[in-house]
Image: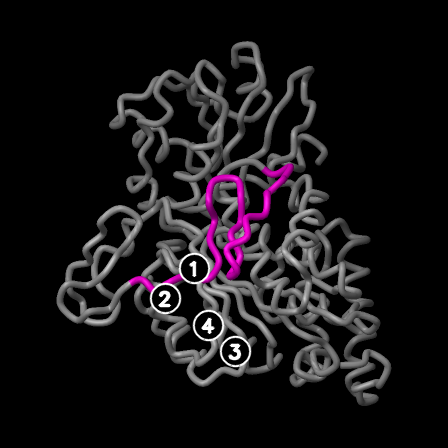
Amino acid sequence: MSGNSDPLTPRAKLAVTAGKAAAAVSRAAGRGSGSVIGGRVALKLDPDLLARLATHLDVILVSATNGKTTTTRLIAEALGAAGPVVSNALGANMPAGITSALSGGSEAKYAVIEVDEKYLSGIARDTDPKCIALLNLSRDQLDRAAETRMMAEHWREGLAGSKAVVIANADDPLVVWAASSSPNVVWVAAGQMWKDDAWSCPSCGGVMQRPGDDWYCGECGFRRPTPSWALSGDHVLDPHGSAWPIHLQLPGRANKANAASSAAVAAVFGVPPQVALERMYQVQAVAGRYDVVQFMQRELRLLLAKNPAGWLETFSLIDPPPTPVILSVNARGADGTDTSWLWDVDYTQLTGHPIFVLGDRKLDLAVRLEVANQQFQVCENLDQAVQLAPPGRIEVVANYTAFQDLRRRVGN
């Protein structure tokens, strides 16, 4: 589609202008990027604005419990080879934040949009996406989000009959069940380290059999589809069987999986895997994730982990013992106020690391670490934890608002 014709009515233009003004005021007041308040103001003035802003764009939606911000960034980088891209790069992934992002995309050809799992169906209805990437589903924010199978069902109903090409992780049974209602699915073997939310069949409730990397339901026959793309070590295998090397500055197996899904998305729009993967190398950090910063004459690596699956992946990429580790947990609105998920994380993987605990819910975390027989110290703040930590780079793992607090403290 051409980006030249103007789809906006006078009312829509007024809404965009008012939203940008509200965002500017918010930024000037030091209240963050202003994208959410700007979007809310704009949608108040024109409730159909999101659909209007999307009409001239090839829209790609990315949704998952974990990895959607990073994957959105990787896809946006890859598609830059084919034309200008607009994206909600800072992760404001509900309708207001998405509207705010698209307001700045009048010259773009592509919109790569991260979408909160709860809002995927509605955003897909409004934006008529060409492509939807579904990465994984696991427990998260138990006080706010539905149980995982209910979320999968919500996706399944919302995607039924969708014209979009759905790029879906063949290794996650919940994602496969959700995507199977769509007529045009490209399956990617992206792997699944966290399996504790997918032991019962989402189709019939039977017990899932999981031999090796395969999975199937012995009762109803629901099973892993044959993937056409796959992550294989440090390579992406394309549908023709060609292996393309992954060179990322982002660490860990999970980000290689994100790159594999991103390459499959880019191919839908004619960007070859080699070009897509080469462009992804440019991404060094994503909204502060994986940044290495200097603080109090120490080197800190900032890692975001918001739920059991995310903590499992993060523990797999931290430097080995005796590297000091700082863990910070809050339970504010954006995190989910229920901290029971802490008991689902296997903290024995931290054995041998000096551990320092902080955040609003540091005592909840301390009890959990005590039960896991870990050695740790409870600290009042980041400064104290850094002072107490033995020499060497410090790995800092935090959930969402704790991560934002830490970024502000280190000036990142």
Mark 3 element type? helix
- Tell me which numbered mark, 3 or 1, is placed earlier along the sequence: 3
- The answer to whether the residues at label 2 and label 4 have Cβ atoms under 8 Å apart is no
Q: Is residue 50 magenta?
A: no
- Kindly state the secondary structure of the residue where label 1 is placed: strand
Find the distance from the CA under tag 1 to the CA under tag 2.
Answer: 7 Å
User: Would residue 13 appear left or right of 205 to someone viewing this image?
Assistant: right
Mark 3 — residue?
Answer: 122
Rendered location of residue 367, percent (x, y): 30, 30
Q: Residues within 10 Å of mark 4 (few under 14, many from 20)?
A: some
Query: Pointer 1: what residue?
Result: 169
**Which residue is under mark 2?**
176
Do labels 3 and 2 touch, CB within 8 Å? no
Amino acid marked by disc 4: Val
Residue 17 shows which numbered tag? none
Q: Quadrant of residue 292?
A: top right
Quick one: which residue is furthest to the left in this view? 219
The rendered magenta stretch, by its main secondary structure, is classed as loop
As drawn, 193 above or below 391 = below
Residue at the image position 66 percent from the left and 65 percent from the top: 112
Q: Position of residue 191 (x, y in %)?
A: 40, 49
Amino acid type shown at disc 2: Val
How far separated are the C-alphas under marks 3 and 1? 21 Å
Give the colouring mode of the picture: one colour
Category of crowding for the residue at label 2, using alpha-carbon neighbours closer than 10 angstroms: few (below 14), some (14–19), many (at least 20): many
Q: Give whichever of discs 1 and 4 has the lower sequence position.
A: 1
